[in-house]
Image: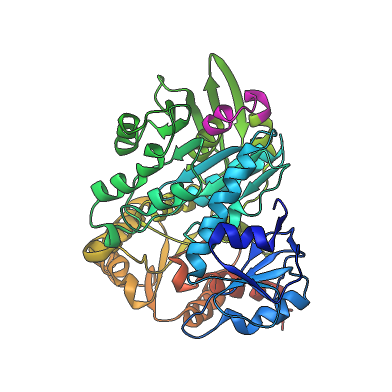
Amino acid sequence: MIPLTLEEVAAIVGGSVVDAAAGLEVTGPAFLDSRNPEPGGLFVAFEGERVDGHDYAAGAVAGGAAAVLGRRATGVPSVLVEDTQAALQELARVFLERRRALPAPLTVVAVTGSQGKTTTKDMLARVLADGAPTVATAGSFNNELGLPLTVLRATAATRYLVLEMGARGVGHLAELCAIAPPDVSLVLNVGKAHIGEFGSQAAIAQAKGELVEALSPEGYAVLNRDDDLVAAMAGRTSGHVRTFGRSQDVDVHLGDLRLDDFGRPAFDLVHDGRTEHVALRLLGEHQAMNAAAVTATALTAGRPFDEIATSLRSIEHLSRWRMQLLERPDGLVVVNDAYNANPDSMRAALETLASLGSGRRTVAVLGQMRELGADSEEEHRQVGRHAERLGIDVVLVVGEGADGIYDALVEARGEGEETRRVDTTARAGEWLRENVAGPDVVLIKASRGERLERVADMLIEAGEEPAS
């Protein structure tokens, strides 16, 4: 963060300084967790239903924070405001304006999409960081709190600011872009994630397109030409347009895609008549399209094509619980993709599992996909049908919310050992411990709230237990 005195912070957010010596500076980032204070940072105290951040303000300052942004005095240096969230967002907006005014260049890259945005953001951050100092959204902290906190982590040396932006309704991305107007906007796809909140894919497309509408005439929209709803967004921006996809008439063409025995993609990326062959160390065919998106975006941000390809080849892993490949000593392979799930990502994960099945028994442990609204039952049934078409050997359905998967499989296969249902993660773990072993391969996937990563932990721990 560019140093600011508490008086400057107060002037920006319309607050008042209390319990602080004149000229006290905030030199570190803003943060929410008092257990992990940022040295010289600004602790943002929120009043929740069960926890009041103000109760932890003194501890945050004792741990090294410079001051607190909150609604009431706590006996430590503070800026007091009426609305903490609005103040945090305004601080980030003005801070970014001041950072852009410095002589050192800064490119703000915004990333959105119905699925894959966190993985793609992480890949992009790695590629850009290989060229210059980069700050990126942590995990999927992509909302009205996560975005301003990420912005406030930038410094005078930051060259690239990569912001994942999530939306749960029309207007949300426009609000985020008002805080951090992008120079480059990447839209990956328009799927069915959160369709229960949006109501339709058309509404999702309307919301995602706000990211390109926020661009200035000097900005760049990077769009997936293979997704018709995304490609149509070219008409919604006054900026330049760059494209990626499998078709030939795009700025970055993805071609000659193959998978190795572990489902890792190797492919050609073609740009401006030049070709780079990339063999990713990441799991899943869908990572190839993510890499094409990253390449188009990084090119737009100024990174050389050959250096982008070199960076992509060097990425060994991204965020945990996202197509994380684990192997037990007995040869059991566990694909932990339990971070989140929607119909499109569920199908992609099952296809990856099927590709790993040569000579191995495939086992899918599937839980509920949340926020699908009235279509939830049918979407779950379609996942079950897809698992059957792919020939997944065993499907273990966890929790009542995923019953549609089980019902569709029973209709196709009949009841038997190949299709099972349990009501808790503990019971799923118990069944798997008794029924899978090397060289089986097990996929674990559900929406974040289902906590299926616990099942992966149980499986790996089982392989570490000494033989009795």
Figure quadrant of residue 11: bottom right
Q: Nearer the viewer, residue 232 or 466?
A: 232
Q: From the top left corner, tell me how far across and down residue 333 is, in percent.
A: 60, 59
Q: From the top left corner, tell me how far across and down residue 219 is, in percent.
A: 47, 30
Residue at 29%, 64% in the rendered image:
409
* Magenta-tinted stretch: 296-307
Q: Is residue 52 above or below residue 330?
A: below
Residue at 49%, 47% in the rendered image:
355
Is residue 28 among the parts visible in the rendering?
yes
- Decide whether the magenta segment is chiefly helix, strand or loop: helix
Q: Is residue 52 magenta?
A: no
Is residue 439 among the parts visible in the rendering?
no
On-image quarter of the C terminus: bottom right
Q: Nearer the viewer, residue 302 or 29?
A: 29
300 sits left or right of 232 in the view: right
Residue at 66%, 49% in the rendered image:
154
Q: Residue furthest front?
A: 22
Figure quadrant of residue 334: bottom right
Q: Is residue 66 above or below residue 324?
A: below
Label count reads 0
Q: Nearer the viewer, residue 309 or 117?
A: 117
Figure quadrant of residue 466: bottom right
221 sits left or right of 294 in the view: left
Q: From the top left corner, tell me how far across and down residue 349 is, in percent.
A: 45, 53
Q: Is residue 271 above or below residue 195?
A: above
Q: Is residue 71 above or below residue 379?
A: below
Q: From the top left corner, tell me how far across and down residue 417 is, in percent.
A: 39, 72
Q: Is residue 301 magenta?
A: yes
Q: How is the image coloured?
A: rainbow
